[in-house]
Amino acid sequence: MSQSDPEKITTIEEIQPRSAGQTAKTRTPAYRPRFWTVTAIFSLVVNLLLVIVVVVLLTQIFAIKAALQEGLIDPLYENFVRMDEARIETTVTVETQVPARFDLPLDTDTTVRLSQDTPIDNAYVDINTGALSLSAPADILLPAGTDLPIHLTLSVPVDQQIPVSLNVPVNIPLSQTELHQPFVGLRDTVAPYRDMLNKLPSSWRELICGPNPGAFCSAILP
């Protein structure tokens, strides 16, 4: 018994360290499978959500393209072009007073009518009748209403305020004003996005078959 006891003790001592080592090796990585399982599940969920989002976007991509092109980009571009080609047409009412200061020269023959009896002293009269011939100075009286032909040569000073009331039609093309450059700049800003959207397909049929599909493609994708 004394010889077998040391052998048993030795065997137990050899077995115990190996059991302890094996236990440490099996317990250390116990959390790792759970971590990778959670990570894999999370990754699958995220990928599934991304796939759903992509599918939804693909089903609506042509609608989004049409909304951007027909509802925003094309109207903006066309309106900027029309604004640059537009004209301001209106009627402006001008009411003011214009000063008139000048000398008006008169050199003309005219006829004046006497408004009352006008005496003329020391006038020289020449009277010839069948019974009487007289040429001599005399005092005469011209009755009211007598027309007298005269020649006027004089300068009349004029200093007046002349009232002016005019309706002035206005027709101004905006392309010849300072607004031309801003309109052109806005149009050129939108133009690249308009061209890009025009080059994109508008349907799955156009995406797969191109802008000019053949008979076979038209039959498959009506």
Image: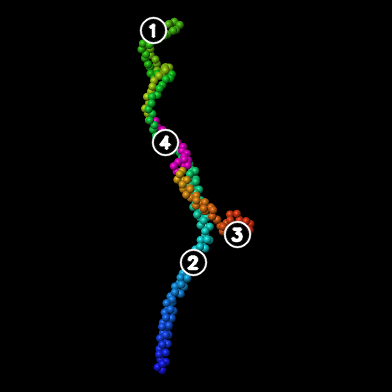
Could you tell me how far apart the alpha carbons at marks 2 and 1 are, in whole angstroms? Answer: 138 Å
Residue under the image location 40 percent in, 93 percent down = 2
Measure the C-alpha gap from mark 3 to mark 4: 68 Å
| Of the image marks 1 and 3, the number of the one nearer the N terminus | 1
- Give the mark nearest the N terminus, 2 or 3: 2
- The amino acid on which the numbered mark 2 sits, given as a three-letter code, is Asn
Mark 2 near mark 1, Cβ–Cβ under 8 Å? no
- Tell me the residue that label 1 is attached to: 136
Where does the C terminus fall, quadrant-wise?
A: bottom right
Kind of residue sitting beneath label 3? Leu
Q: Crowding at label 1, few (<14), some or many (≥20) Cα neighbours within 10 Å? A: few
Q: Where is residue 98 in the image (x, y as percent from the top left)?
A: 39, 31
Mark linked to residue 94: 4
Magenta region: which residues?
A: 162-179
> Separation of disc 2 and disc 4 at Cα?
74 Å
Q: What residue type is labelled 1?
A: Ala
Q: Main secondary structure of the magenta part?
A: strand
**Picture coordinates of residue 173, whole percent (x, y):** 48, 40
Q: Determine which residue is flagged by label 3.
A: 221
State the residue lying farthest toward the left.
121
Judging from the image, what secondary structure is the residue with disc 2 in? helix
Instruction: Tell me how the rendering is colored.
Output: rainbow
Residue 167 highlighted magenta (yes or no) = yes
The residue tagged 2 is 47
Q: Visible in this render: residue 84?
A: yes
